[in-house]
């Protein structure tokens, strides 16, 4: 039983209409952002209560997780392809195949996969399809990476090699690989990071009193499981807590910067990791945050002010040339720490953003790998002797991680590898990310 099945009835008519609007766009947009900006004023959503809107969102998430499965089942049922044709069919498959699949049939296949409960899908109308679905997946064997098992879990058959590479590099047992694969279809909690000195249990009690349903895991991490929006909580408004995935928090902790040191967060974005790195520095030393987009740095500036972190500086940098060092960094001949949280395929965030999976392509991965090497090469000029270069991605692909580290070390023999590892899922109920620490001799 998939954990995301719907415990109450979802209005099928509304769901199909919202899905139709969503799938008009190509490539498919991030669902949460689309609903926030496009669906916020959608009368189809506003007619429902907040809990029912959440059910619709979860149903949409399941539609995205098993999008290829649904199109494959219809093609197989219509005898347009055979089971033996699936590997070749997968190579040419695109999300645009949804255009030729009626919504009614699409959602029937999703309901069959998730054991969901949507009104208007009667057994009588689809008895043949139901029987076909059960027979097809009854052939699943013990091979975790068989075509049937991969499609059942929402993975494309062509990703088998990627999963094998990850299992080998991380030395996962079959049990660990199975946990990784199965967790892809389970949305992790929204995790919080304590920015200021607050007791976890007191924070949890305070959030409950404000209508925010907080949880803690076995490691004392605090997250959210429902209730009111965290954005309305007093602690969030005061900058005492930040929303940040556990794997992302672990990357920031890997940058073990001390008070007084100089740190460069190369691809800072809106600054989640910058804030986490700067907090233990106690406003001593300097953290430089750069990004190619100024509007993201503007958001970092706002967040840093709320968090009362005044040792963060920010400006744009495009990696076309080595960084011109700030005066205080040039005086010590480089940064103590450099974090390159590189642009990547974001495959490690598929649990939260299943739509991103259908944008993954070999050509994009090759292009991203070239960009990752470019940023690493330009950034490393700014590291002082005996300083640490930290490379990170929110991807689990070996090509974007261990292979990138190996290539960089071959081209820069003055660097040595200290450690590298996958963070988060399947060990933690979070995203999956990668981090490597290299030291300059």
Image (spheres, rainbow, N blue to C red):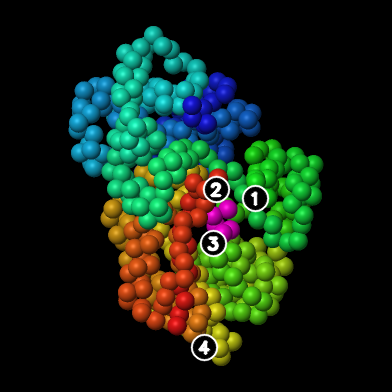
* Location of mark 3 (residue): 251
Upstream in the sequence, badge 3 or badge 1?
Answer: 1
Q: For the residues marked 4 and 1, what is the alpha-carbon distance in whole angstroms? A: 39 Å
Q: In the displayed structure, does residue 14 sit left or right of residue 230?
A: left
Secondary structure, mark 4, is loop
| Label number found at residue 120 | none
Q: Position of residue 392 (x, y in %)?
A: 46, 63
Asked if residue 174 is positioned above or below residue 101 in the image, the reply reads below
Q: For the residues marked 2 and 3, what is the alpha-carbon distance in whole angstroms? A: 14 Å
Q: For the residues marked 4 and 2, what is the alpha-carbon distance in whole angstroms? A: 39 Å
Upstream in the sequence, badge 4 or badge 3?
Answer: 3
* Location of mark 4 (residue): 333
Q: Are marks 3 and 1 in contact (CB under 8 Å)?
A: no
* Location of mark 1 (residue): 219
Asked if residue 113 is positioned above or below residue 339 in the image, the reply reads above
- Name the front one of labels 3 and 1: 1
Upstream in the sequence, badge 4 or badge 1?
Answer: 1
Residue 364 visible (yes or no): yes
Kindly identify the residue that appears in the image at 28 percent across and 43 percent down: 158
Q: Position of residue 127 (x, y in %)?
A: 35, 12
């Amino acid at each position: 039983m998939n954990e995301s099945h719907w415990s109450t009835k979802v209005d099928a008519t509304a769901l199909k209409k919202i899905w139709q609007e969503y799938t008009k766009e190509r490539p498919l947009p991030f669902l949460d952002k689309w609903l926030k900006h496009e669906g916020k004023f959608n009368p189809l959503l506003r007619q429902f209560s907040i809990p029912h809107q959440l059910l619709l969102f979860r149903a949409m998430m399941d539609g995205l997780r098993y999008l290829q499965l649904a199109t494959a089942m219809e093609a197989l049922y219509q005898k347009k392809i055979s089971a033996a044709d699936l590997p070749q069919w997968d190579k040419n498959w695109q999300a645009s195949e949804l255009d030729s699949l009626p919504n009614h049939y699409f959602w029937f296949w999703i309901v069959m996969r998730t054991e969901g409960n949507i009104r208007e899908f009667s057994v009588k109308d689809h008895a043949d399809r139901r029987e076909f679905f059960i027979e097809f997946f009854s052939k699943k064997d013990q091979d975790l990476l068989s075509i049937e098992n991969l499609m059942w879990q929402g993975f494309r058959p062509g990703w088998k090699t990627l999963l094998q590479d990850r299992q080998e590099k991380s030395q996962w047992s079959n049990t660990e690989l199975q946990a990784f694969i199965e967790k892809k279809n389970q949305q992790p909690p929204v995790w919080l990071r304590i920015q200021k000195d607050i007791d976890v249990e007191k924070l949890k009690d305070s959030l409950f009193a404000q209508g925010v349903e907080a949880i803690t895991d076995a490691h004392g991490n605090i997250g959210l499981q429902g209730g009111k929006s965290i954005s309305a909580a007093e602690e969030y408004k005061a900058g005492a807590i930040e929303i940040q995935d556990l794997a992302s928090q672990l990357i920031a902790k890997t940058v073990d910067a001390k008070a007084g040191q100089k740190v460069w967060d190369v691809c800072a974005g809106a600054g989640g990791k910058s804030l986490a790195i700067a907090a233990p520095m106690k406003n001593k030393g300097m953290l430089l945050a750069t990004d190619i987009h100024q509007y993201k740095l503007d958001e970092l500036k706002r967040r840093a002010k709320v968090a009362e972190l005044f040792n963060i500086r920010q400006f744009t940098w495009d990696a076309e040339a080595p960084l011109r060092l700030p005066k205080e960094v040039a005086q010590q001949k480089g940064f103590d720490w450099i974090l390159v949280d590189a642009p990547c395929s974001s495959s490690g965030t598929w649990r939260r953003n299943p739509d991103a999976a259908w944008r993954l392509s070999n050509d994009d991965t090759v292009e991203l790998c070239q960009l990752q090497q470019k940023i690493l090469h330009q950034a490393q000029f700014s590291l002082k002797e005996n300083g640490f270069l930290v490379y990170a991605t929110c991807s689990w692909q070996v090509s974007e991680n261990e292979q990138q580290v190996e290539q960089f070390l071959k081209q820069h023999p003055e660097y040595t590898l200290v450690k590298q590892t996958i963070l988060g899922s399947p060990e933690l109920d979070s995203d999956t990310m990668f981090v490597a620490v290299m030291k300059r001799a």
